[in-house]
Image (cartoon, rainbow, N blue to C red):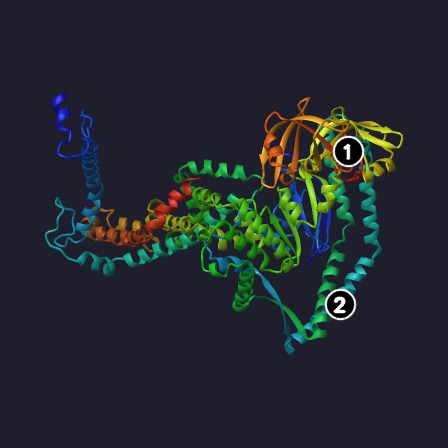
Amino acid sequence: MATVQLTHVKKVYTGKVTAVYDFNLSIKDKEFVVFVGPSGCGKSTTLRMVAGLEDITDGIVQIDGKIVNDLQPKDRFVSMVFQNYALYPHLTVFDNIAFPLRLMKQVVKVPLTDKEKESHKVKIASFDKSIAILNKKIVDEKVAAKRQEALAYIDEQKRPLSKKLTEETDPKAKAKLEKKLEDLEYDRLKAVYPIDAERRLKAITDERTALAAELASGEKVERRKMSNDQIFEKVTAVAKTLGITDYLTRKPRALSGGQRQRVAIGRAMVKDCKVLLMDEPLSNLDAKLRNQMRAEIILLRKKIDTTFIYVTHDQTEAMTLGDRIVVMKDGLIMQVGTPQQVFDFPENLFVAEFIGAPKMNTLKCSLVKEGAKYYVNPFGAKIEVTGEKALTLAKRKVETREIILGVRPEHIEIVQEAAPNAIHTTLQVNEMMGSEFHLHLITDDGTPLIVRTPTIQLSDKQKGELVYGKSVYLTFGGQAMHFFDAKSTFSLLVDQPENLMKKPV
Amino acid sequence: MNTEKEAVVVAETTMDPIVLPPKKHMGMRTKNRIGNTLIYILLILMSIVWLFPFVCIILQSFRTESTMMTGYIIPKVWGFDNYVNLFTTTEFPRWLLNTLIISLATAVMQSVMILCMSYTLSRLRFNGRKFLMKFMLVLGMFPGMLTMIILYRVLADLGMTMSNSIPGLILVYVASSGMGYYISKGFFDTIPKSLDEAARVDGATRAQVLFKVILPLSKPIVIYTILTAFMGPWGDFVFAAYVAFNNREGMNVAVGLQSMINTPSGINANYTMFCAGGVVVAIPITLLFLFLQKYYVEGVTGGAVKG
């Protein structure tokens, strides 16, 4: 249960491959966020940076308001489910789930003994003395003056260097200058950073307050290993939730894929973590099991009640599981939003094509403004933009321009005969999906289109006619259209957030 | 040709006769049998050559009619006198204890060093890792004898020679042990990295990952490492002799036994006892091998597949 905040997070692998550019995201407490994108888009890398398995090149990751950049994974209080389960093969299911508990130390309150109380008092007295001495030292004007001097000196050195940098053209020399500037910046930070006395003062004050608090409450905090009874209780409770009670004595090798994944999830949820990270947990399962486990994760989520970050390349998983979806491509966030937002108002062509199956049809055409009305003209047809979309276009004062028109396959209708608002196409392939057909068609100039059409409205005769070479007229409603700039591929309907989509050169 | 064909037609049955192709060559089975026989003859010859010294030394150790070297192998009078004398009249128990101390200490320390080193090179990425690995590979190609003189000098300066040679020997055996990382690193490399990552997220430190996850999964290689670490010092002669420098208190078994027979009079007086000593030294190693053989073989191949 915690918030997660990623600010300007960047990852550059050695060998200068940038996996993640400037990732900014704020995850609310108990939110289920899904990172989705094609392979190699940096989604797993981002997750692993949150887990602490990957160094953060630049930027800040905060969990529960605390900066965790330099913390080991074990100190971040996160759990993780891996794509390949990563169960410990030498341990039984019980021991696998108990593994994190056995490593964990619990905070237990123990009453102070009289002897300890005495020693506490003595320590506090000596701390008070040191605090007084240190305070005097810090107040000493020389310290402050010296620091000012140092800062001024560094700034003075930096100025000519930055000037040189703007004039320099040779990339090698430029890099050298940048390195020098960086070093100076580091020195500056060191100068600003609390000096030794201040640091020591802070440490001593902290310890003193801790001791005083212990004295006041008469209890001290101890970190102890969890007892076997507690572990047994917790593990069996988790096993019951996941329905793996019968396999607790088995080794992972004797389990099926689905059971293994359950154990992996059990191991992740057994400790009270702040964030539960899932890295493509369902990718190794077959399709049927995947659907089942997906439903189970939705149910589990209600029981576990923590913050989730889920990574997947499957848009169906993203849509069904997430409170919010983060669509990524090539290390950049393309859009963040609820599944509905992302589906209905894709901010760019990539998101439009990535979310939804089969993928959205894209047609090159122009958007024509005639008076107050907007028209699109794909393949000679003339279709009016209606409803809210038209209002938004008018509000944003969009003029006549070249666009890429996006229409989802389920929003295209088949019409019986030629009409001014219909496109003529030829059927190539008819995929029978049960309750619907996926028709693969090409227009007269060879652009492929996909149409999803429910079978229930079609008569047997009509169904029989949908074979290769059949000529079909298509049209679509004015509401169902998405407009993307032909060059930048941004949507014309929404503002582009400044920080997204900016790829540094 | 024709007659042969008819001969293999099975005529007695009521079913359609099965016609077998005529036999042109020797059958597969016969061929195999001849090949196997030849191979076995060769192998038996080889093992006789190989086993001869062992049989010899065992037989000699039971010979009690004389202590000198003789022209025959089978003893005329059998007895345990040599063994009894070995333990009662010589410093052999002391040498055995010395060797045991050295070997056990080396086995423990060297194994820890090698396993930690292998884990580090397998899992951690740091500047100069590749260079270090190559450097150690090249360094390992120089014969160890080259360093002997300087090592002796160092040990002498540290006061770790002569009667005080045990800590000195342990130090030398353990010091360079990190260089023997190849096999266990190769084995660790085959263990999926995600196991490490899972354990680290579960709250383990790097050391806990090594001891709670990686080592239990690498039992064969751990046993292999311990075994080789134990055997090295157990049978070492050259360096041990050099460090002990004829001081009888600082000798290990190999050096001690050799010291019994390195003079003409010694060889006449102690030869059979020397053989008994050899047998005694071989016993623990043999037992260890029999006991751990299964893991040992697994360990060597297990690490080699994906080195």
In percent of the image, x 58 and y 42: which residue is there? B126
> Does residue B191 appear left or right of residue B240 in this picture?
right
Q: Secondary structure at mark 1?
A: strand
- Up the image or down, A222 lies above or below B180; here it is below
> Does residue B304 appear left or right of residue A482 in this picture?
left
Q: Position of residue A410 (x, y in %)?
A: 68, 38
> Extreme bottom residue here?
A114
**Nearer mark to the viewer, of 1 and 2:** 1
Q: Secondary structure at mark 2?
A: helix
Q: Quadrant of residue A315?
A: top right
The N terminus of chain B - image quarter:
top left
> Does residue A453 appear left or right of residue B229 in this picture?
right
Q: Amino acid at mark 1?
A: Phe
Callout 1 crowding tier (Cα within 10 Å): few <14, some 14–19, many ≥20: many
Q: Nearer the viewer, residue A283 or A208?
A: A283
Q: Quadrant of residue A138?
A: bottom right
> Does residue A169 appear left or right of residue B169 in this picture?
right
- Up the image or down, B264 lies above or below B130; here it is below
Q: Is residue B118 visible?
A: yes
Q: Which residue is mark 2?
A: A129
Q: Nearer the viewer, residue A192 or A411?
A: A411
Callout 2 crowding tier (Cα within 10 Å): few <14, some 14–19, many ≥20: few
Q: Position of residue A84 (x, y in %)?
A: 53, 46
Tag 1 subunit: A
Q: Amino acid at mark 2?
A: Lys
- Please say if the residues under marks 1 and 2 sit with CB atoms less than 8 Å apart: no
| Callout count | 2
Q: Which residue is mark 1?
A: A483
How far apart in space, not on screen, are marks 1 and 2 (Cα)? 72 Å
